[in-house]
Image (cartoon, helix red, strand yellow):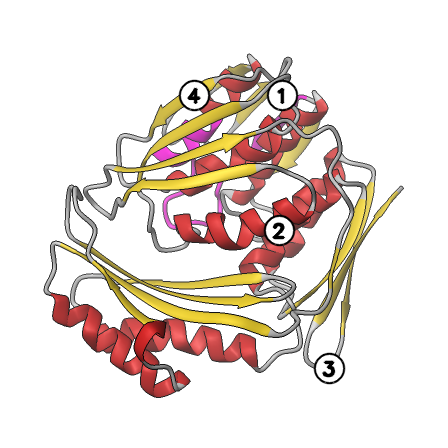
Amino acid sequence: MIELDGSQGEGGGQILRTSLTLSMITGTPFRVTNIRANRAKPGLMRQHLVAVQAAAQVCGAEVSHAEVGSSALEFRPRRIKAGDYKFSIGTAGSSTLVLQTLLPALLYADGPSTVLVCGGTHNPMAPPAQFLQRAYGRALDMMGARVDIQLRRYGFYPAGGGEVLASIEPCAELRQVELIERGELCGAYAEAVVAGLPGAIAERELQLVGERLGWTGDQLKVIEPARVQGPGNALLITLEYEGITEVFTAIGEKRVRAESVAEAVVGEVEDYLSSGGALGEHLADQVMLPMALAGGGKFSMHRVSQHAITNAEVISKFLPVRIDFQQSIDHSVCSLLTG
């Protein structure tokens, strides 16, 4: 039984999600206390509870104290089962974070699987569906995983109602990769998503993106999705390189000007472009787990976040891998070594 303190390091939900994923794969039970202790509303929220319930269903686990608000739980996994799964968060909680908990584990199932998660698809402090499709999905593909992710319906806070569908093929062994160089820039574009809101919001966001990044025409796209339960806005910037794809996002909120939303995401892109790292902060954090499952790898990153350090510590409790960070002048390098 692995003992984990959820207040350690970054102290958020990633500690729980990483533990669930690796517990399923390794068959190792764990107990975690002080869940999300460093958050404004500590304990399990609805999206975290659904992640626990989904993981338990996928591997037939025994779980104790799994309820909204719980600050501790135990998880005892059994065998991962392939299947067609559907999970509904019931709120606008992040569907993508639930999905990311399950995807690596289902690579080790005894057959192909599908997972449909209903809830929010574009949330603050969570990767949007396009990040999973383009950035995380491409990294998995380079490691030999076959995962297809479809955004079936957009879902924004507070209405939710979004749908993300993933199809996962079993993978006997992930390949070790090194993601050190971005390579040449092959494509770059911005998408302003407006649902149930004036199109002028998207136009103002894209105008600022164009002015700051020097983009015009086909690089600036307005998306007005149908069948959305409530209003919402997201601005996404995608950079496609020879070696990697990155997706940067800002979510519109009430009483926040369109220009402020655009400023936030453009600032993040400019920060990334000024660095020498291949991966942005969030993608670096997410590829660490599949690289550890592959038994090793290396990547350069814009900066080492507390989130990444905490994730590395949790991974090392479940897998015999050493994760080292080395700082250079304009980037950092993360190395994963078995043993």
Q: Is residue 70 visible?
A: no
Whether residue 37 appears in magenta in the rendering, the answer is: yes
Which label belongs to residue 329? 3
Q: Quadrant of the N terminus?
A: top right
Which label belongs to residue 174? none
Q: Residues within 10 Å of mark 2 (few under 14, many from 20)?
A: many
| Number of dots carrying numbers | 4
In depth, the one of 103 and 90 nearer the eye is 103
The type of residue carrying mark 1 is Ala
Q: Is residue 73 left or right of residue 308?
A: left
Q: Residues within 10 Å of mark 4 (few under 14, many from 20)?
A: some
Q: In whole angstroms, how far apart are the C-alphas of marks 2 and 4?
A: 24 Å
Q: Mark 4 highlights which residue? A: 85
Pinpoint residue 276: horizontal percent, then vertical percent: 66, 77
Q: In whole angstroms, how far apart are the C-alphas of marks 3 and 4?
A: 46 Å
Quadrant in the rendering for residue 152? top left
> Where 150 falls versus 312 (above or below)?
above
The type of residue carrying mark 2 is Ala
In depth, the one of 254 and 59 nearer the eye is 59
Q: Give the magenta part as a residue range.
A: 29-52
